Amino acid sequence: MNKLSCAKDTLKFPQLRNNSFIGSFPSIAKFTSLKGFYADSNKLNRTLPGSLATLPHLSSFGLLMLNLANNNFSGEIPNSVAGLHKILYLHLNHNNFVGGLIFLKNCTKLILLDLGNNKSSGEMPNWVGETMTKLVMLWLRSNELYNIPFNMCHLSALQVLNVSGNNLSGATILFQQFDCFVPWERKVPDDVGQLAMLESLDLSRNNLVGEIPTRLSDLSFHSHLNLEEAVFHAPSLIKLKPLPDVFQIQNCYIFCSILASGYNIFVTQFRGMETLSYGSALCCQIVNSKWKLVEKGLNSCQSRVSSIGKVGVYYTNSTISACGPVRLYAMGRVQLRGSKRVNNLKVFCSGSYDGYVSGEEGARDISGIGEPATKVLVPGIPDDLNGESGAPISSCFWGWKPKLNVHYEKAGCGNMDSPHVLFLPGFGVGSFHYEKQLKDLGRDYRVWALDFLGQGMSLPFEDPAPLSKEGAASNESICSWGFGDETAPWATKLVYSVDLWQDQVRCFIEEVIGEPVYIVGNSLGGFVALYFAACNPHLVKGVTLLNATPFWGFLPNPIKNPRLAKIFPWSGTFPLPSSIKRLTELLWEKISDPKSIAEILGQVYADHSTNVDNVFSRIVETTRHPAAAASFASIMFAPQGELSFSETLSRCQANNVPICLMYGKEDPWVGPIWGLQVKRQVPEAPYYQISPAGHCPHDEIPEVINFLLRWWIKNLESQGSVSLPLLEDLDSKKHTIIDRELEFPREGSRKSVMVRFFASNFSLWDKIRSSIKFQSKLVDVLAAKSQ
């Protein structure tokens, strides 16, 4: 590798990653245009040169990115690395580097620094917070560091901080508006809730101690908190506010005294632990195997440490009965038999049961926040086999721009006085994915489904970058459009990006539909729907998100981040660069393989009895279009939109655009946590979590999605005089979480799913308290105790 040589005056971003290169760091001093160097995931070893003699001019080169992660480098990182004045991204993680961090002193422009999983030791220098103020992500996990200085406060842009697995013993850090850290002997004050930009914080595996601040839940970050293996004192635990569901506080000792709550039943809970109090005495203590909770009752001077099996339940005489009968819902399969009674609690079960375990009639959730799972019968999808015909579907094309023809399908155009409903598809599919909505909802509404440009049947009719005759003769293996060296005039600025798609939706509504619409999007379609609504609120009556992806695009937006965007030489335009052509051919060969398509469908559909034959055949058909491969490359390398998902939510909220969330719980890609994040930012949005259902609930359980959509639209059209779906007999202001079993006919039999509704006053602690997994374990324990 030391003999590396090529176009030394033009090479900018050599990619040597994921190989098996061995030996020392290569000499690349002659590459005078170098901007980034990637040699991660190899077997490079030895130490970096003390003077970096092989890299004498990196500073003048303006090196922006250096990735040497996942190798076997050892020794100290030489101080001469400080000469990398322009470095933005530095990955040295997963090596065996030792020593301190002095080499970072002059790297003042760093945005991302990853030194995790090395053997760096000592304390972090004081100048880190003074000179590295642009840091956004800092990973120091699994080293031997033991201090963080006061002036870390100046890292005002920091969003990710991971110092897990170090020697940060003693008391935890003090954060106050993220403007100081204090010595470890102090406790954590209430001002911990005033962090500014931090999105993720990991202090786990440091043997931290101290008091849990009551304002912990005021932290502004949404993504991740990990305090694993800490020991906290929480004298005022019941004052804590809801914590996001993504927080991880496992294997954590909590010492607390439970005070009178003033409610019939009061629950304070972190993930994996729950403590219930009733009146002025301890009612019930739940201990997960990953927790050890030490509680001290008001009438006792003796503490008890509880941990029995997977879950231990401790209660005094009749304390559970005081709470009333209990209804529990099981996420897994509950192995119980017979009828078990614990005080006034009666649990009915027989063998293995999917769904829920019921208490006596009128029972409520043990946390006091749920409702009985009333069964609701909903209509099936119209089917010619049962004599019920659906709305006829028309397939159409709209000539948006020269050579850019947009395919769409419509139904119910005769419903002249009814609202318009527009469906936007996910990545890799098209309007055909909404056939069940068009047939059913088309009987009541004017329904439209659109194919995004570059997907479905909206792929171009002509080659955007045709091969020359000479090129075609010499590249017989390339049979796809878009692989030529010159762009057709009509495709000069063509990039299949979210900005193009939201503009496509805007023009389609203005020119074809002609009226504001209710817009529904699944996956990518959900992202575009929200993006469009944020930019064009006057054209939107409401947005429904079906497992919407919360991000799209990898490259920076040239308008939002022009300087960063210049680093990347290609951003999805035609023609494709030669290196991208080869990469696309290799990827496309795998992605378009029918076996791969079948595997993906098997992942995203939770109910494998769902017939996906039509979806499978239509996807395969699309992959055979000559423009499909190049369109895929353009989509993958297109820049991000000008607005982030969070920014679009804020704009919609500011413009009073109604939002409804319907998420399949078993989605392996966009799990319920993303829906809960939206719910947290837009509390007034009704959120329906459906199980079992995966990434495409509209196709997997169309009966349920169509039912919920109908009633949500009726609620908005009636300005609230018609109740939200599933709330006909309930006041959502009094109930934070409501469960319903929805049953529907399909192919001569009946099927059912559980739907959980989260009201406007729902908090994430309500979600934790009513955790289905926790309750299924509780059933086992209560039954065992009654024997």
Image (cartoon, rainbow, N blue to C red):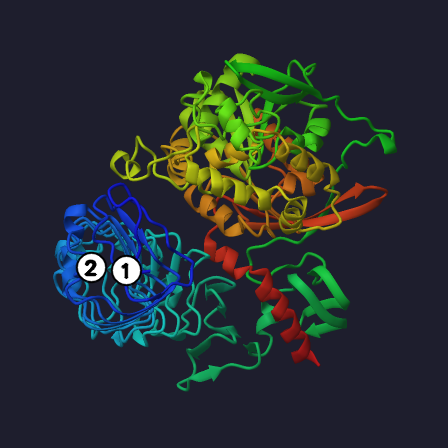
Looking at this rendering, what residue extends furthest in the bottom direction?
302
At numbered mark 1, what does the secondary structure look like: helix, strand or loop? Answer: loop
Q: Earlier in the sequence, mark 1 or mark 2?
A: 1
Residue tagged 1: 26
- Cβ atoms at labels 1 and 2 below 8 Å apart: yes
Relative image position of residue 542 (x, y in whole percent):
52, 29
- Relative to 680, does residue 148 appear above or below in the rendering? below
Is residue 718 something one can see in this rendering? no
Residue sitting at 44 percent across and 39 percent down? 580
Relative image position of residue 680 (x, y in whole percent):
44, 46
Name the kind of residue labelled 1 in the image.
Pro
Q: CA distance from mark 1 to mark 2?
A: 7 Å
Say left or right for 408 vs 277.
Answer: right
Residue tagged 2: 54
Say left or right for 362 vs 630.
Answer: right
Taking depth in this image into account, of 195 and 134 the one nearest to the observer is 134
Q: Quadrant of the C terminus?
A: bottom right
Q: Which mark is residue 52?
A: none
Q: Quadrant of the N terminus?
A: bottom left
Say left or right for 132 vs 22.
Answer: left
Relative image position of residue 73 (x, y in whole percent):
30, 69
Q: Quadrant of residue 702?
A: top right
- Relative to 42, does residue 740 appear above or below in the rendering? above
- Relative to 721, does residue 184 appear above or below in the rendering? below
Taking depth in this image into account, of 698 and 557 the one nearest to the observer is 557
